[in-house]
Every structure is written in C-alpha cells, then in structure tokens.
Image: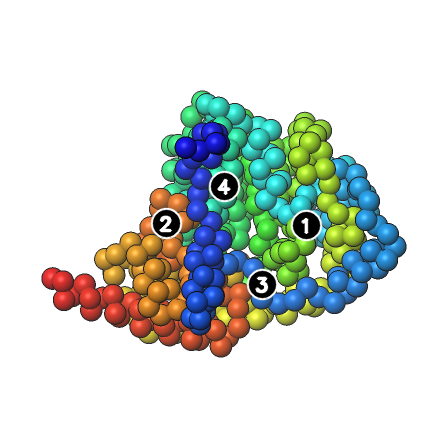
Amino acid sequence: MSHFHTADRMKGLSKSSFDMLRKAKELERSGREIIHLEVGEPDFDTPEHIKEAAKKALDDNLTHYAPPQGLLELREAIAEDEKTRKGIDASPDNIVVTPGAKPMIFFTIMVLSQKGDEVIYPDPGYTSYRSMIKLAGAKPVPLELKEENDFALDVDKLESIISSRTRIIILNTPHNPTGSILTMKDFEAVAEIAEKYNLVIISDEIYSRQLYEGEHVSIATLPKMKERTVVVDGFSKAYAMTGWRLGYGIVPDEIIPKIIKLQTETVSCVAPFVQMAGIAALKGDQEPVRWMVEKFRQRRDLLISILEESKHITVKQPRGAFYLFPNIKKLGISSYEFTDILLDRYGVSVLPGSAFGLYGEGYIRISYATSEENLRKGAQKIVKAAEYVFNLKQKEK
C-alpha cells in the first residue's frame, strides 16, 4: 500500500526527451555503443569569455541573493540586444530574468489561466507546453501544424479552435521540432485574432539566433502587440549554456508584478554569477554564435543528404533551430515502434514524433547538435533501419 497520495495534476504529463535519454544511457551502461541524436542541446562548450566572467563573479563573491526580477545590468543588456536584434523596444523594467526560458512560459500560463480556461499551443510542438498548461489546471488545445503547409501556422484553423474560454496562444519560431519559422504575414493575422478575442500571446523565441536565412521577426514589434505579448528567450541554445539555466521574458506592465511575485515565491532568483555570465554573452564577441550556426547548417545539409538516400523517409529542410523532423509514415509502424527498433537494434537514439503531440505521429525528431561523424553514422543507420522495417512489413503481407 502506497504512503503517498499524488495530486491529479501529475496525471497525463507529456513524456520528455529525457525519457529516451534515460533508456539510451541504460543501454550504454550495459556496454552498448549509442549514438545520441535525441537531446536538444548544443554539443559545443560555452565560449571562454562567458566562463571567465562567471569565474570573476565568483571571485568577487557574487554568491548571494539577487533581486527576483534580475540584475539591472543584465536587464539593460537584454533590452539593448532585443532592440538591436529584433526591433523590440523593451524597457529593463519589463524584463524578468529566470532560471532558463521554461519557467517564464510556466509562470505566464500560471498567472493567466486556471481551471476551465483554454490555452492553444502548436502540435507538433515542444513537449513541455502541454504539461505546463495541464499543471496550471487549464485545458491544452492543440493547433495542428501540417507538413504540406511547411509546418507553418494555419490562421483559419487557429481561429476555428478559439472559444470563450481561450486565454493564451503559444507561438514558437524558429520551431521545435520542425525547424519551421513564422513570418510577419503570419504575425499580422495572429495579431488581428488576438485583438479580436482579447488574447495574450506567449512568443517562444529561444531559437531566435539559430536561423539559416533571413532575419528573425517577433510578433511583439507589431502595433499594440507588445502590450499583449510575453516574449520568451534565453542563453541556452545560442551560447551553448544549457546547464547554466538562464532565460528571460519581456512582460507587459499589467502582469509583470504577478510574474515577479511568482518567481519570488518559487525559485527566488537566478544566481548572480550566472547573470554576470549572461552580460558577458550579450556584450562580448558574437563570432562563436555565428560559428555555431554555420556548423549547424553544415550538419543539417549532411544529414539531409544521407536521409534522402532512403525511399521510405522524406524530410523538409528546416529554416531554423537544429532539428530534423523526418516523415516515416511509409513504414507503416508508429513512431515509438520505430525509435525502439532504432535504439535496440541499431544503437541510435532519436525521439518519436508522437512525443511532440498528437499530430507528431508518423515522424521522428533528430537533433543535429552533435559531431558530423556521429551524424553520418547515425543517419546511415536510420536509413538501414527504415529498409529493415519496410522489408519486415513486406514479408508480413
């Protein structure tokens, strides 16, 4: 008999990439060689000048509590960067520094939704969106992104799923897991809908620097949209700082006291020496960022060139982030079945598309944030696995 009565809010939470990683690590511990293509984290080290800034901050004893909203110097650096890079006229007073970008999304959902409310999120989409909505007690409403539409936003579909209980629309560009991007035309249509139904937008822009063509655009730059948009960004992907846990939000006046209050009552603040590293990241040399993006581009192209050799897999070229989302529907098995075969038989760990939502079924997500050698070997094994499954299915007929 269990001693613990767990809360209903824990039921039905999404599986994360770490579930597959755990299984892959168990196989590794048993002596298997595993190629990891599952977790979305750059394989590069944090640039030296960023690490040096953190070391200096530690030597200067910046190890005490920081203001819950974040150090003013970092918020000023973020405001300057957002203005220069995205054209968002943000005041440091409207910026909250959080331990990673994820808490900012969660805090916003918690502040703006409750039981009976609805939150629209992209599907396929980042696994944590659905979980965070459910934890807030609200109802997750998936917005289907279709491959034939380049996984772009369908405005008519969006409006059709809005109800009197809808409170938030979550946007993500560049998009995880498909690498698609939203355009200013998309944003203009969403802005009109947000105004019409009095909705708040959470704009997840964590991959805003991982763009292979054009300039990143944000819905917050449109007229009247800064007042109804929470822009979320961070340092993890751009500066290879996943373990540092440093993100931020640009928050409208109306709700920023509540966001700060929620941060105060949960995580308190972000470590000040980590925030000093963030200042160095924004104000220092940006060449490492450009270098990493170019490496990702080369890896993307290599991966696609190998996967295109398969008659059973099709893949769209991503325009941002560092993921491929290949279509495996021709194989006639579920994405979970295929990823299990791939891991157990071929030693390659990728994520099933269904982990990213109902409409992710029939796809797999491959992270190309790893070496070209790993990608080449992994992609060749994926092609072999697809051929194996196809032949197996032919024999069953």
Q: Indicate which disc, 2 or 3, sits on the residue closer to the N terminus.
A: 3
Position in image of residue 132 (x %, y %): 51, 37
Is residue 12 visible in the rendered image? The answer is yes
Give the residue at x 38% y 58%. Answer: 364
In the picture, the quarter occupied by the N terminus is top left
Q: Indicate which disc, 3 or 4, sits on the residue closer to the N terminus.
A: 3
Disc marking residue 42? 3
Q: Secondary structure at mark 1?
A: loop
Position in image of residue 104 (x %, y %): 62, 40
What's the distance in space between the residues labelled 3 and 1, CA to CA? Answer: 15 Å
Location of residue 206 with respect to 326 vertically, above or below: above
Location of residue 271 with respect to 348 vertically, above or below: above
Residue at which label 4 appears: 129
Residue at which label 1 appears: 246
Residue at which label 2 appears: 354
What's the distance in space between the residues labelled 2 and 3, CA to CA? Answer: 23 Å
- Type of the residue with mark 1: Leu
Tags 2 and 3 in contact by the CB under 8 Å rule? no
Position in image of residue 307 (x %, y %): 37, 70
Tags 3 and 4 in contact by the CB under 8 Å rule? no
Q: Indicate which disc, 3 or 1, sits on the residue closer to the N terminus.
A: 3
Tags 1 and 2 in contact by the CB under 8 Å rule? no
Position in image of residue 187 (x %, y %): 53, 42
Structural crowding at the residue carrying mark 1, measured as other residues with C-alpha within 10 Å and reported as few (<14), some (14–19) or many (≥20): many
Give the residue at x 47% y 29%. Answer: 5
Q: Indicate which disc, 4 or 1, sits on the residue closer to the N terminus.
A: 4
- Type of the residue with mark 4: Tyr
Q: Secondary structure at mark 3?
A: loop
Structural crowding at the residue carrying mark 3, measured as other residues with C-alpha within 10 Å and reported as few (<14), some (14–19) or many (≥20): many
- Residue most extreme to the front: 1
